[in-house]
Each structure stands twice: as C-alpha cells, then as structure tokens.
Amino acid sequence: MRNAGPRRGSGNDTLFAAIGEFLHLHGLDPAPAHYSFAHAALTDPTIGAAVARLSDGGVRLSRRDIAALGGSVSARRPIAPLPPPDDSAARLVEQTQKQVDGFADLMSSMRQETTGFGRDLEETAAAIQRQPNIAGLDEIARLTGAMTARIRDTETRLANATAETDALRTKLGEALAQARRDPLTGLFNRLGFEEAFATPVAKGAPRCVAVVDVDHFKRFNDEHGHGVGDRVLSAIGRGLETACKEHLVARYGGEEFAVLMDGIPLVRAAAMLDRAREDLAKRTFRDRETGTPLRRITLSAGVVAVRPGEVLGAVLARADELLYTAKAEGRDRVCTA
C-alpha cells in the first residue's frame, strides 16, 4: 500500500481522484465526514505529514488515529478487498503466442504463393522455347504484371509482418521482465536474482550476498492471517530496498529475501543489512482494521563475500549456514563469516 500523505495535483479532478484513493486505502466509505477528513489530509501539510507517518509500512489509519487528527469515522467501515492477482505476464505470453502463430501463417501463405508463381513462370518459359510466338509474349506480359502486383502485395505484407515482429519483441521483453518479478512485493524473484548473479563483475571487484529471513513468520501468519502477512512482507521488501540502495534485493521464496551487493566489501555489506534490521525492529505494525499493534517483526541474516569462481549454490549454502547461526544465537541479528 502506498503512503497517503499530502498530494498536490492540478485542478479539482485531481483532488477528487486523490480523495477517492485515500478513502479506499483507509477503508472509509464515502460519508461526508470521511470526505472532509480526506480533504484535510490531502491539503493540510501538517495533517498530511501525520497521516504519512502513521500509515508508514502499509498500515491503515485506526479510528483513534483519525479522531486524534480531528476527523471522525462513521459506524460503517468496510474492509477493502485485496487486489486481484497480477496475471499480466500470462496475458502477455498468450498474446505473444497468438502473434507468433499469425506470423507463421503469413509466412506459410507467402511461401505457397511464391512457389505457385514460380511454377507458372517456368511452365510458360518452357512453352515459349518450344513454340515462340506473339501469344507467348502476351503470356509473359501477363505474368510480369501479375508478378509486379504480387511483389507490391508481398512488400506490404512483409512491412506489416516486420511491424508485428517489432511489437512482438517488445511484448516478449515485457513478459520476460514480468517473469523475473515477484507479484506480491514487486522485487526480483529467484530467477531474476540468479540471472543477476550470473552477470560477472569487474575483475577484482568485491561482491557480497546476504540471505535474510523474517523471524517467526509462520507464527505471525497463524496469529494475524496471510493477508496481514503479505502486507508486512511487502513493507519489509521496501525497507530492504531503501537500506540497500543501488543493490539488488529479491524475494527468494516465502519469507526469505536475498540481496546481491556489488562493489562493496563484506564489512560494509553487513553494516547495510544491520541498518535494515534495526530500522525494521523499531517499526510498529498494526492491524489496519482494528488499529491493534501487531507483534514486533525482526530479521535474521547471513552475509558472505563471494569467492573468485564460486557458484551461486555454494555462496547461498555459506550464507544459509550463517543465517542458521543468527537464528540459534537468538535471532534479530546479522552474522558474517
């Protein structure tokens, strides 16, 4: 969920749309009192800053929060539905397949026409050699005209096919990008991380890998539900991206994240992860419907420096071992080799 702080737009239409988005994000129905509070939150910098601070990490404002900021909440406060699953990658693949099939049909048709025209031309040439006459010349003229028309038609169809191919290339690129992203957090997924690791760094440049795990996350999901757990995972992903700027953060699976840090030594990589861990430990997550504070969320991590020529499996195995050490030593810590 995005933070709902002050937002400036051009004109009443922009403000009206922003108010509607604000109401949706905080589960407020379109009552006059709610419109009034949303308008204040989006136009008053002081209230807007307070809203952004309270809703940081994807939490919804509670009744107490709204009342403290001078607003009020009506009796009915609907639960906003979860967004539908992102199936854009599947749609792109399906559309791409249709274009591939259409292009194949076009090329097949053009090949058949070319073959038929070549056969007609060969037969006419052979007949002229056997009996040269004016009728034969007329036939050549007819075939030449037909050939010119077909060439023009072929040029047009080839131009269209080229345009379709360019569009296909773009769509394939989009589909490939989608295939490398985690739909929940927007981070790179396992495939994206593995491909990034396969890209070599400059000779002698340091490279570090961290494996990060959310402590007791199964218990958290059991207590608060997977919907809340998903929102927390998204917030953790954003926090890791913020702390590890210019480096690649991936959701490697479940509640596990991986970070690829190029160009920095192990001590700096560990300090970067430790800042992310500290920032998360200080945050208070709350139930968006009730405003009840949730259990404290902490991270454990193992960070290693990649050795020359070391394969990813070996790197992750060493980082995992350090992660288990962090868990065994009490969690909420970063361990390095």
Image (cartoon, rainbow, N blue to C red):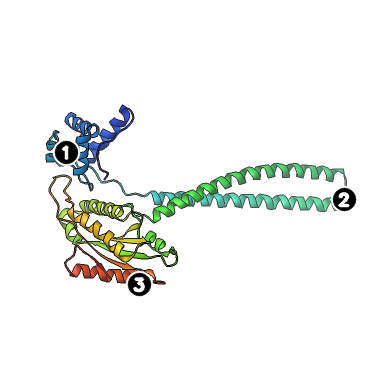
- Residue beneath label 3, please? 314
Q: Label 1 neighbourhood size at 10 Å, few (<14), some (14-19), many (20+)?
A: some
Measured as percent of width and height from the top left, residue 108 is found at 60, 52
Looking at this rendering, what residue extends furthest in the top direction?
12
Give the number of the mark in front: 3 or 2. 3
| Amino acid type shown at disc 3 | Ala
Q: Secondary structure at mark 2?
A: loop
| Amino acid type shown at disc 1 | Arg
Q: Is residue 68 left or right of residue 13?
A: left
Quarter of the rendering containing residue 259:
bottom left
Residue at the location (30% across, 71% down)?
318
Q: Work out whether residue 26 can be spotted.
A: no
> What is the C-alpha distance between the residues marked 2 and 1?
94 Å
Residue at the location (37% across, 65% down)?
207
Residue nearest the viewer, comparing 221 with 40: 40
Contact between labelled residues 3 and 1, with CB atoms less than 8 Å apart: no
Contact between labelled residues 1 and 2, with CB atoms less than 8 Å apart: no
Instruction: Give the answer, above or below, for where 169 lies relative to 28.
Output: below
Give the mark nearest the N terminus, 1 or 3: 1
Query: Which disc number belongs to residue 77?
Result: 1
Q: Secondary structure at mark 1?
A: loop
Residue nearest the viewer, comparing 239 with 75: 239
Contact between labelled residues 2 and 3, with CB atoms less than 8 Å apart: no
Quarter of the rendering containing residue 15:
top left
Measured as percent of width and height from the top left, residue 265 is found at 34, 65
- Residue beneath label 2, please? 131
Q: Quadrant of the N terminus?
A: top left
